[in-house]
Image (spheres, helix red, strand yellow):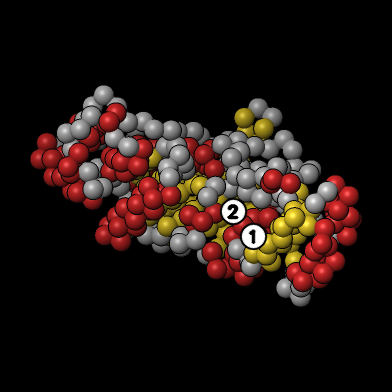
Amino acid sequence: MNTAAQPAQTGPHAIEVETVAKRFGRVVALDGVDLAVPQGSVFALLGPNGAGKSTLIDILCTISRPDSGQARVGGYDVVKNPRAVRNEIGVVFQTATLDTRLTVRENLAFHAAVYHMTASAGRRRTTEMLELADLTDRADAVVGTLSSGMRRRLEIARAMMHEPSILFLDEPTVGLDAPSRARLWSFIDTMRRTTGLTVVVTTHYIEEVEGCDLVSIIDHGTILATGSPAELKSDHGKTLVRLTPRDDETRTAIMEAYPSAKPGVDGQILLTLEHNENPEAVLSRFGSELRQISVDQPSLESVFLSLTGREIGGAPAQGRKGRANG
């Protein structure tokens, strides 16, 4: 292993992915993914469960190898120089990995030891991360006694102990309530602003990517679109009308009248309207036969529906079977 390997000259990108593919048996997890994440940005990989998000993160974190293609993280090739990549990154997995029998401070100290930090550097960094994560007063508490939100902040603090340049967060807010999620994102934003950190987050919570610099929408192992939230809405967003019909007869009539209609969750019908279409026409035609109607202006949710033919938490679109993972 060449621990003194030098990063390639990759320009202003913290991560570069070129035609990366990965299979698990007959299942295509990643299908020729191309990606470039600017340094210092907050980048979101948005997609439903089974889209390929975790598989891509595993490759970028050197946990898994691509079948083909190339990926560079922090300027280092993930296959040729995995140790150098690991020194550049901090990782928070979707599944908790804290030792709940140890204290908060002991979890941080153990991570410092794994990365061969000196005793003085470990103590200094522990103090810094406890303060940043708002856990100073719980430093000597056993992790098993912490709330889920505190544990998540501790996991991020631990991942930042060795001062990585890139932080990977795989579904970091799953299982947290709204206040805990907001507090966690505030913590992440503070770290990014104070250190120039590049943050890569995977999520299926659309509202969490509104404040990101760059978003890639992934489904069935393929990147469908990439841009800022505003760019994605402008290029792919459509007015989304949600209809809840009173009976099956009305449902059939709506689906026949609008061939582009898609089934939504909880018995809804989803219509995506072009810019020149008026949702009032739908209301005037079927209003008395509807239990409920709502109109959403172009949003990332409508972007996802427009690109994939389904809601992010809904059933797969027709004709796209045989591709999934993580």
Where 13 sits versus 116, above or below?
below
Residue found 30% across the figure and 61% down from its top: 193
- Viewer-proximal residue, 226 or 128? 128
- In the picture provided, is 103 more to the left or to the right than 83? left
Kindly identify which residue carries mark 2: 217
- Residue type highlighted by circle 2: Ile
Which kind of residue does numbered mark 1 sit on? Val
Quarter assignment of residue 316:
top right
Residue 314 x %, y %: 67, 45
Mark pair 2, 1: CA separation: 9 Å
- Residue 118 against residue 46 in the figure, above or below: above
Residue 218: image location, x then y, percent: 60, 49
Task: Look at the numbered discs 2 and 1 and tell me whether their residues touch, using CB distance below 8 Å.
Answer: yes
Q: Residue furthest bottom?
A: 276
Residue that protrudes farthest toward the top in the picture:
101
Q: Residue at x 31, y 41 (%)?
A: 150
Circle nearer the viewer, 2 or 1: 1
Tag 1 residue = 303
In the picture, the quarter occupied by the C terminus is top right
Q: How many marks?
A: 2
Helix, strand or loop at mark 1: helix
Residue 125 x/y as whole percent: 18, 45
Query: For this rendering, which residue is in front, 9 or 196?
Result: 196
| In this view, 7 is above or below 154 | below
Residue 95 position, x and y percent, is 43, 33
Looking at marks 2 and 1 on the same chain, the residue that comes earlier in the sequence is marked by 2
Mark 1: give few (<14), some (14-19) or many (20+) Cα within 10 Å: many
Instruction: Name the one closer to the observer, 156 or 37.
Output: 156
Q: Residue at x 60, y 66 (%)?
A: 233
